[in-house]
Image (tube, rainbow, N blue to C red):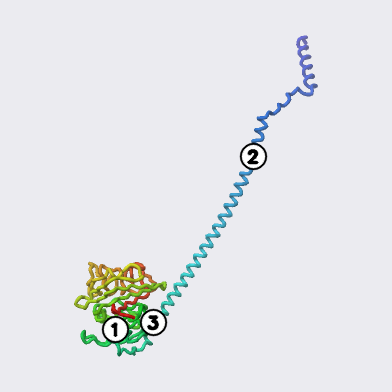
Amino acid sequence: MPSTALSATTCLCLFIVVFVSHPAWPQKPPKRQGPAQLKGAKCCEAVRELQAQVANLSAALSELGRKQEKDWVSVVMQVMELESGAKRVESRLTDAESKYSELNSQIDIMQLQAAQTVTQTSADATYDCSSLYQKNYRISGVYKLPSDDFLGSPELEVFCDMETSGGGWTVIQRRKSGLVSFYRDWRQYKQGFGSTRGDFWLGNDNIHRLSRRPTRLRVEMEDWQGDRRYAEYSHFVLGNEINSYRLSLGNYSGDVGNDALGYHNNTAFSTKDKDNDNCLDKCAQLRKGGYWYNCCTDSNLNGVYYRLGEHSKHLDGITWYGWHGSSYSLKRVEMKIRPEDFQP
């Protein structure tokens, strides 16, 4: 072996012995963290804490949302139960009102059947109920007026109101039970129909007879809530048949709101078979009554009797536009007259 090769081999062996026998190569000492690095570490810790708080808050909000949704469903269920209960109560109330109305009708029928044909004495009657009142007849009820030789009118049965606003009123119309239809022809309105103890129209000939002297008209109304109102008119006159029973009214007073009969002033009477209104339409046929239809109505006191005021599709009920409007049918109406110079 040449000496150069031996020398190289010897050097390599010495290098390996030194490398293996040395414990470790010297390492650089770790660098010390500066203020900026410490501040960054603290900031990261604060971010992690904030993230944890946000996570906790999100979880709490989710739980609250679930609870709210559950409570809302419970509230909706309770509202639905209340609405169902209200409908049941309303249905029972409607049934009760219907039975009450039927009972009232039966009572009216029984009263009409039980009423005697004998009326209170009227020997002192000379003209109307006011003349009886002046003779100290102070009980409201049915009386008979003597015949009128001048007009050729026979003895007339009337209902006298001896109590309202001083008394002395002769009732010419009443609606209270709906047992009598007021959709009548000219002849029936001329002569009168119904019962003076129940629903009736006294008759246009008879009303003309009683309004030949200066007369006052009083209209009394009641709604289905029990509220009562009235309207009075001075100088009430009903023309004769030649003048188609034309209506004439004076000044209005009362507490029933706007005057709803003045619109019909100076208007002829119309029935389903005799159209005397001021309209192209046949108002008596549209409004289902006999009345002083103009074109057509501000009031319709002889219209159809609707129980409980149900009257939304047609304008043919017992209406007074100045009080409840055109779609409300009244429960009770009375029209009555007495002389203007009457003194209670």
Residue at numbered disc 2: 48
Q: Which of marks 2 and 3 is nearer the N terminus?
A: 2
Q: Earlier in the sequence, mark 1 or mark 2?
A: 2
Q: Which of marks 3 and 1 is nearer the N terminus?
A: 3
Label 3 crowd bin: few (<14), some (14–19), many (20+), radius 10 Å: some
- What label sits on residue 298 in the rendered view? none
How far is mark 2 from mark 3, CA to CA? 88 Å
Work out which quarter of the rendered image holds the C terminus and state it. Answer: bottom left
Asked which quadrant contains residue 244, the reply is bottom left
The amino acid on which the numbered mark 2 sits, given as a three-letter code, is: Arg
Residue at numbered disc 3: 108
Asked which quadrant contains residue 231, the reply is bottom left
Residue at numbered disc 1: 128
44 vs 339, left or right, is: right
Q: Position of residue 205 (x, y in %)?
A: 24, 81
For image coordinates 65% across by 41% down, the residue present is 49
Foreground disc of the pair 2, 3: 3
User: Which residue is nearer to you in this view: 257 or 72?
Assistant: 257
Q: What element carries label 1?
A: loop
For image coordinates 63% across by 46% down, the residue present is 56
The amino acid on which the numbered mark 1 sits, given as a three-letter code, is: Asp
Work out which quarter of the rendered image holds the N terminus and state it. Answer: top right
How far is mark 1 from mark 2, CA to CA? 104 Å
Asked which quadrant contains residue 43, the reply is top right
For image coordinates 54% across by 58% down, the residue present is 73
Foreground disc of the pair 1, 2: 1
